[in-house]
Image (cartoon, rainbow, N blue to C red):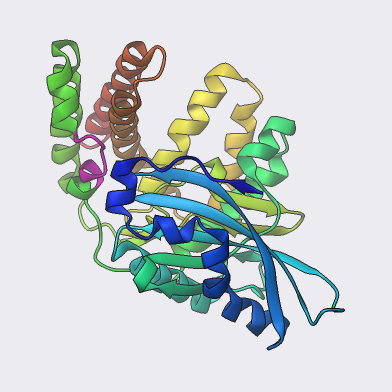
């Protein structure tokens, strides 16, 4: 099976290795050394089923389901790995950061059962990073089956562990770095409609005023795009995944991003509110300082702005009303931040 969509020309031009990365026959030679390290020198890959999980002009996430055996009479073996085709340089950084986390308490044998996927290899000639596929289901998918505070407790523990990790993952990010993640950039959103320009300006100017008022904030490892889809849970085990944006920043930035998503769900589903509390209780019980919450509104405002820019890019049904709503929430959040940090 090959669940591979047609590759847009823009994607193929920017990610020049996609032709190889999405070809099962050519990927046999790429993945066979890893398969042989796992099953023995005589292991032969018979087939690779390829499924594109996510795609963007600068990022493809691919699942490789591998089937093979050792010798003609050997028992068939099946396993899967995840491949990420990224802009050159980004995959190398991802692999290095994952390796550092793996060595600083997030390995498979972690005593607290909170881990990340094992980084297997980075192939610069293909701009391809390969990592193990983890088990369990995302907290987002588990929530669809029914509310269970245990899943949110696991997510809170996992994020707190990341924020308490002693590893250094590059220079700390600031408000300007967060604004740079808007795609398209926020001036494009402001120019798209006079009705939006004032709100965009208030959020951006407010964020730039508030950040210096925090004083010296200790940057910690952060996920950078933390939401319910980024934590997998199975029983007592939890995994943090999709670590492309991991780095160093104010830990409140991860909380702000998550709480925007959770509060949106809570407005539509009352059962989510106690789950938010379960998450926060577990997060702070793991040793995080509750004073972080005072800085969260700034990052909620930036998340609303980033989501509004994304809605402009995607142009889905009702996108104009959606942008207006996101900007209103962003303005409310930055006003809260300015009141708390006069």
Image spot of residue 3 (x, y percent): 59, 44
Quarter residue 185 falls in: top left
Q: Main secondary structure of the magenta part?
A: loop
| Number of numbered callouts drawn | 0
Lateral position of residue 97 relative to residue 36, left or right: left
Q: Residue furthest bottom?
A: 41
Residue at left offset 61%, top offset 20%? 269
Image spot of residue 197 (x, y percent): 14, 19
Residue at left offset 56%, top offset 24%? 266
Can the viewer see residue 287 in this picture?
A: no
Based on the picture, tell me whether residue 110 belongs to the magenta stretch: no
User: Residue 40 or 220: which is nearer the viewer?
Assistant: 40
Quarter residue 128 falls in: bottom left
Quarter residue 116 falls in: bottom right
Image quadrant where one finds the C terminus: top left
Lateral position of residue 14 relative to residue 122, left or right: left
User: Residue 323 or 50: which is nearer the viewer?
Assistant: 50
Image spot of residue 112 (x, y percent): 66, 68
Write down the region rendered in magenta. 178-185
Residue at left offset 24%, top offset 66%? 171
Considering only vertical position in the picture, is 275 above or below 321?
below
Residue at left offset 38%, top offset 67%? 126
Based on the picture, tell me whether residue 184 belongs to the magenta stretch: yes
Can the viewer see residue 305 in this picture?
A: yes
Image spot of residue 150 (x, y percent): 71, 45
Lateral position of residue 176 relative to residue 61, left or right: left
Lateral position of residue 14 relative to residue 265, left or right: left
User: Residue 63 or 222: which is nearer the viewer?
Assistant: 63
């Amino acid at each position: 099976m090959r669940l591979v969509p047609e590759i847009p020309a823009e994607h193929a031009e920017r990610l020049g290795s996609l032709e190889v990365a999405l070809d099962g026959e050519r990927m046999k030679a790429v993945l066979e050394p890893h398969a042989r390290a796992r099953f023995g020198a005589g292991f032969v890959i018979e087939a690779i089923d390829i499924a594109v999980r996510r795609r963007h002009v600068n990022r493809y996430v691919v699942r490789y389901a591998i089937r093979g055996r050792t010798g003609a009479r050997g028992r068939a073996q099946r396993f899967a790995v995840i491949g990420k085709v990224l802009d050159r340089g980004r995959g190398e950084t991802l692999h290095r950061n994952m390796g550092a986390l793996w060595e600083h308490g997030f390995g498979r044998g972690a005593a607290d059962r909170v881990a990340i996927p094992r980084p297997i290899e980075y192939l610069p000639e293909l701009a391809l990073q390969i990592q193990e596929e983890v088990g369990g289901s995302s907290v987002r998918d588990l929530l669809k089956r029914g509310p269970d505070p245990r899943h949110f407790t696991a997510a809170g523990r996992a994020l707190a562990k990341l924020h308490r990790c002693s590893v250094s993952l590059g220079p700390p990010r600031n408000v300007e770095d967060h604004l740079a993640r808007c795609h398209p950039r926020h001036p494009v959103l402001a120019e798209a409609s006079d009705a939006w320009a004032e709100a965009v300006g208030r959020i951006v100017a407010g964020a730039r005023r508030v950040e210096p008022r925090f004083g010296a904030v200790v940057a910690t490892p952060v996920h950078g795009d933390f939401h319910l889809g980024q934590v997998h849970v199975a029983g007592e085990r939890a995994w943090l995944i999709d670590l492309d944006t991991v780095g160093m920043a104010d830990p409140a930035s991860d909380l702000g991003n998550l709480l925007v998503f959770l509060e949106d769900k809570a407005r539509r589903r009352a059962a989510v509110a106690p789950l938010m509390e379960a998450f926060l209780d577990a997060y702070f019980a793991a040793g995080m300082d509750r004073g972080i919450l005072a800085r969260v509104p700034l990052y909620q405002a930036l998340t609303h702005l980033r989501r509004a820019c994304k809605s402009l890019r995607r142009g889905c049904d009702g996108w104009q009303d959606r942008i207006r709503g996101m900007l209103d929430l962003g303005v409310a959040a930055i006003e809260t931040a300015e009141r708390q940090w006069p």
